[in-house]
Image (cartoon, coloured by chain):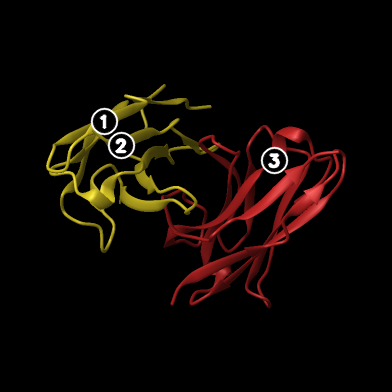
Amino acid sequence: EVQVLESGGGLIQPGGSLRLSCAASGFTVSTYAMNWVRQAPGKGLEWVSVIGGSGGDTYYADSVKGRFTISRDNSKNTVYLQMNSLRDEDTAVYYCAKDRPSNTDYVPDGFDVWGQGTMVTVSS
Amino acid sequence: DIQMTQSPSSLSASVGDRVTITCRASQGISNSLAWYQQKPGKAPKLLLYAESTLESGVPSRFSGSGSGTDYTLTISSLQPEDFATYYCQQYYSTPLTFGPGTKVDIK
């Protein structure tokens, strides 16, 4: 079965750092673009970042650029989101989501597999 | 960045009703549009991509149409399990953006 499982969320003080993990099974993360999407409590969906293509191109939302870094470990079939300089407004459920088609080069598409999400709370 | 809007923001409907949700992009997105359904406490679920292609396993009562900047999601006969929030998403260019959502609840 194709699935992803997020972990690493928790309570962190403003200015702190956290690393989220997204472990994939049933497919290889190096052959699909992988995204992070977040949802603040009671709010809508916000795309955060993507790592895609065999070259691992990365893209970020302006709201996290320079603070968050997406990466992947092909040997562990896992994608990560390193979050630094966290702010109150980063509080959200963070979802890992797989792009629908497999592409050598990154071509954006819909997200067909989502994890259950991991909660990140930034608060003093 | 491409801004996405949806209308209405919420609607009340009855089982069996035909429901239409509209999504508008701030610039043309060449049918690079997906629709998702989200139920409370759950992850979003892909319903359609490429504006009108039904994801595997999604009931045929869901359909999509549109072009350029304007797109619609139609549920032909609303079922009890369809009460949820629906989001459109453009993937024409990064940053990828979602609409604010349309909540469909029971009349």
Q: Position of residue A89 (x, y in %)?
A: 71, 33
Q: Judge left or right: residue B77 versus residue B81.
A: left
Q: What amino acid is found at the position of numbered circle 3 in the picture?
A: Thr
Mark number, residue A124: none
Q: Establish whether labels 2 and 3 are both on one chain.
A: no
The quadrant of the image that shows the N terminus of chain A is bottom left
The quadrant of the image that shows the C terminus of chain A is top right
Q: Secondary structure at mark 3?
A: loop
Residue drawn 74% across the image and 50% down it? A69
Q: Judge left or right: residue A51 versus residue B39.
A: right
Q: What amino acid is found at the position of numbered circle 1 in the picture?
A: Ser
Disc 1 to disc 3, how far (Cα)?
Answer: 30 Å
Residue drawn 62% across the image and 60% down it? A55
Q: Position of residue B41 (x, y in %)?
A: 49, 51
Residue drawn 32% across the image and 48% down it? B49
Q: Earlier in the sequence, mark 2 or mark 1?
A: 1
Quickly name the residue at label 2: B105
Quickly name the residue at label 1: B12
Using the image, name the chain to which the residue with label 1 belongs: B
The quarter holding residue B14 reads top left
How packed mark 1 is, by other alpha carbons closer than 10 Å (few <14, some 14-19, many 20 or more), is few
Q: Judge left or right: residue B9 versus residue A93.
A: left
The furthest residue to the top: B26
Q: Is residue B21 visible?
A: no
Quickly name the residue at label 3: A91
Residue drawn 87% across the image and 39% down it? A15
Q: Quick one: which chain is yellow? A: B
In the image, is residue A68 above or below residue A89?
below
- The colour applied to the residues of chain A in this rendering is red
